[in-house]
Amino acid sequence: MSELESFRQETRAWLEANAPKSLIGLQMTELTGVWGGKKWAFSSDAEKEWLEVMGDKGWTAPTWPTEYGGGGLSSDEAKVLSQEMKALELPPALIGFGLTMIGPTLLRFGNEAQKKEHLPKIVRGEIRWCQGYSEPGAGSDLASLQTKAERDGDDFIINGTKVWTSYADQADWIFALVRNDSSGIKQEGITFILIDMDDPGVTVSPILLISGKSPFCETHFTDVRVPVKNVINEIGAGWTVAKALLGHERTMIADTFGGAGLKARKASERTFLPSLAVEHTGEVDGRVADGVIRDEITQIEMDSRAFALTVQRTKDAAKAGQEPGPESSMFKIYGTELNQRRYELMIRILGPDALGWEGPGFDEFALDTTREWLRSRGNSIEGGTSEVQLNIIAKRVLGLPA
Ligand SMILES: Cc1cc2nc3c(=O)[nH]c(=O)nc-3n(C[C@H](O)[C@H](O)[C@H](O)COP(=O)(O)OP(=O)(O)OC[C@H]3O[C@@H](n4cnc5c(N)ncnc54)[C@H](O)[C@@H]3O)c2cc1C
């Protein structure tokens, strides 16, 4: 038996012995997944238990080195773990920006003390992170950011406002871009710094979204004192870190919305859209009655499958130590458009059932789908708009003149 095959058997046996049975088949989405952190309220003991056993084994971050709490698995072993979890219909024990954004960034740019302090807490889901990039005057043109960091001995004093900070009200720490110098070109003089949300002077106010839910916040910093040791990479060299993190973010968004983690994909993945269409639009000879809807379902399923495989290839390369490059912009556009297409189709299939907002007369699934459809409009904005991704592809992938 090959080493990988025996690893597969051990993994399956371990998962069968340790995963709470009540979690089998449960869908983990942005809304229902476990994000962890000090403020997290588990919806069941089983979720808590699952996070504890997976965190102890380092399998919430399977490829991170064991000295930082990770699983120390090779990319092939991590793939086996993910396949076995899928086969047993087990949800991930933990999701969030710690695992997908700041963790990989710390592994590359953090110093030893920073890695030792933050990575194990991410693996165990003890600390939840949010992202402080955008500002009222700096979104696509991120380098125009104005949040000011003034040096005072061993600290920076930070003043300014971040906007669209997803889940800032739930987070324990924020990774933020601040301006320490305005004298040179705007990409210089930016510092990437880690800030404890409990520090005096940090305040958060929620912003409501079109979907009626509010993961969004404005985050204000008023004379917040942050130790210089919290700077990642050199002072003033934050732009390099910021771009590398965006590569991880775009791959994560593409994967979450367009790839394998899609909410719309139920356990009975391939039969989900057809059975929804049969239920709401009728059936002829065992097939979806409406030929146009049938065609669109087939197209979306083919595109989703092809896309998931392409993203998987890049993830394999990333696990082998290669960082996501500008090609993550292609995935970001395609994945988010795919997600928007899927929700448009679901809304058309649901017809009048998708018109509900709350209250009796509409089932929970339809209400949820309508809100998720509205939420999907933000996919082509978050992590950098589609127009900005097209600019990146033109310049950095195709090498076209600026
Ligand atoms: C769901 C969601 C979650 C988010 N979460 C976070 C978060 O956690 N942390 C965070 O920091 N930010 C977050 N954001 C903010 C997001 O990164 C910004 O909204 C995004 O970068 C766009 O910036 P903006 O909103 O200022 O739009 P603008 O930059 O003002 O853009 C307005 C329009 O102009 C277009 N445009 C701008 N520049 C160009 C150009 N050079 N070429 C062509 N077209 C252009 C854009 O495509 C867009 O259509 C989130 C956004 C969303 C929707």
Image (cartoon, grey):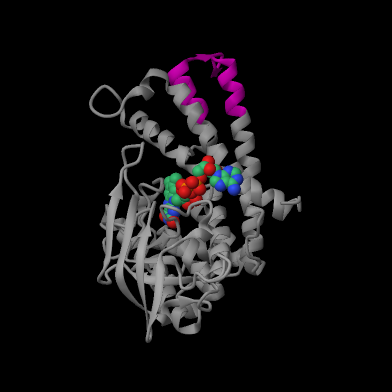
User: Does any portion of residue 262 appear in the rendered image?
Assistant: no
Q: Quadrant of residue 178?
A: bottom left
Report the side of 81 relative to 133 (left or right): right
Q: Nearer the viewer, residue 208 or 267?
A: 208
Magenta-drawn stretch contains 285? yes
Residue at image location 66% in from the left, 66% down from the top? 322
Residue at image location 32% in from the left, 25% down from the top? 356
User: Does any portion of residue 142 appear in the rendered image?
Assistant: yes
Q: Residue furthest front?
A: 183
Q: Residue furthest top?
A: 284
Seen in the picture, residue 28 relative to 203 is either above or below; the reply is above
How far across and how far down the image is residue 165, in percent? Answer: 38, 55
Figure quadrant of the N terminus: bottom right
Q: Which residues are magenta?
A: 273-298
Q: Magenta-highlighted stretch: main secondary structure?
A: helix
Q: Nearer the viewer, residue 335 or 239?
A: 239
How far across and how far down the image is residue 265, in percent? Answer: 49, 39
Magenta-drawn stretch contains 17? no
Q: Nearer the viewer, residue 196 or 255?
A: 196
